Amino acid sequence: MRGHNPRESLRYDRRYEPYFRRMDLLQFVLNFKGTPPWLNSTAITALTDRWRPETHSFHLALGEMTVTLEDIAMISGLPIEGRALTGKVKSEGWRQRVAGLVGVEPPPWIHETKKDPRPSGVLFSWLQEHFYECPENASPAVVERYARAYLWNLLTQVVFPDGTGDTASWMFLDPLRNWDVKWSWGSAALAFLYRQVMLV
């Protein structure tokens, strides 16, 4: 599990841990806090060349191999028990929903003649600009917003990266609304991995 651009990570703060613990994501965060390793595109290409969609496995010289849910849980620390990470995703008003969860609204797209190149999220550089380091004297509400932004950044860089490598999709922020809901993040990660391999 690697990130597209490890330089766009946010500074970890121990004040975030109670929130991550409530969502059963503390082990995952501790595995990847700091700078996630670089994405190795050569290794990814080699693996996708050996992917067989009819058997959902990689055909390697030593035999067939597949990634299981248990592998995801052991490698990443993501929980595999809990509610399925599904639901309807509405794009209308996503900037306002982001503002409601992290306290800062992404700027609107202002070019009338061109299509918005980022209709599905914010740039990692935007997250870094606004949430790089939580202020020392921050109130609990502000710490919670920074914790949510940190987790959103980490999940979308390491587990659910988009094809551009520079965008944090807003659809992965919404499940972070309630810290006490237990989601099966590992199942979502495995499904996302299979979907991405099928698209290549």
Image (cartoon, rainbow, N blue to C red):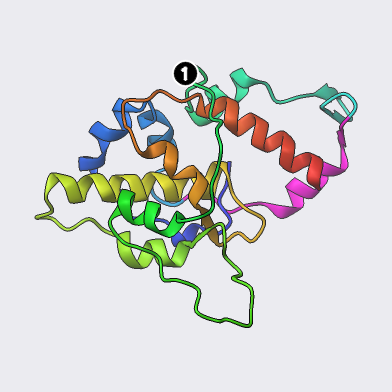
Foreground pick, 124 / 85: 85
Image spot of residue 61 (x, y percent)? 89, 30
The residue under the point 39% across, 61% down is 127
Height in image: 90 above or below 125?
A: above
Dot 1 crowding, Cα within 10 Å, few <14, some 14–19, many 20+: some
Quarter of the figure that contains the N terminus: top right
Height in image: 193 above or below 84?
A: below
Is 24 on the left-hand or right-hand side of 167? left
Height in image: 12 above or below 165?
A: above
Is 86 on the left-hand or right-hand side of 58? left
Foreground pick, 160 / 169: 169
Tell me the quarter of the picture where residue 174 sits. Answer: top left
Foreground pick, 78 / 62: 78
Tell me which segment is drawn in magenta: 36-53
The residue at the far left in this view is 137
Foreground pick, 90 / 27: 90
Q: Find disc 1 in the rendering and name its residue.
A: 82
The residue under the point 51% across, 55% down is 92
Q: Is residue 49 magenta?
A: yes
Image spot of residue 186 (x, y percent)? 55, 27
Q: Tell me, yes or no, if residue 132 can be seen here.
A: no
Image spot of residue 55 (x, y percent)? 87, 23
Is 97 on the left-hand or right-hand side of 195? left
SS of the residue at dot 1? loop
The residue under label 1 is which amino acid type? Gly
Tell me the quarter of the picture where residue 177 sits. Answer: top left
Numbered disc total: 1
The residue under the point 63% across, 83% down is 113
Image spot of residue 153 (x, y percent)? 44, 51
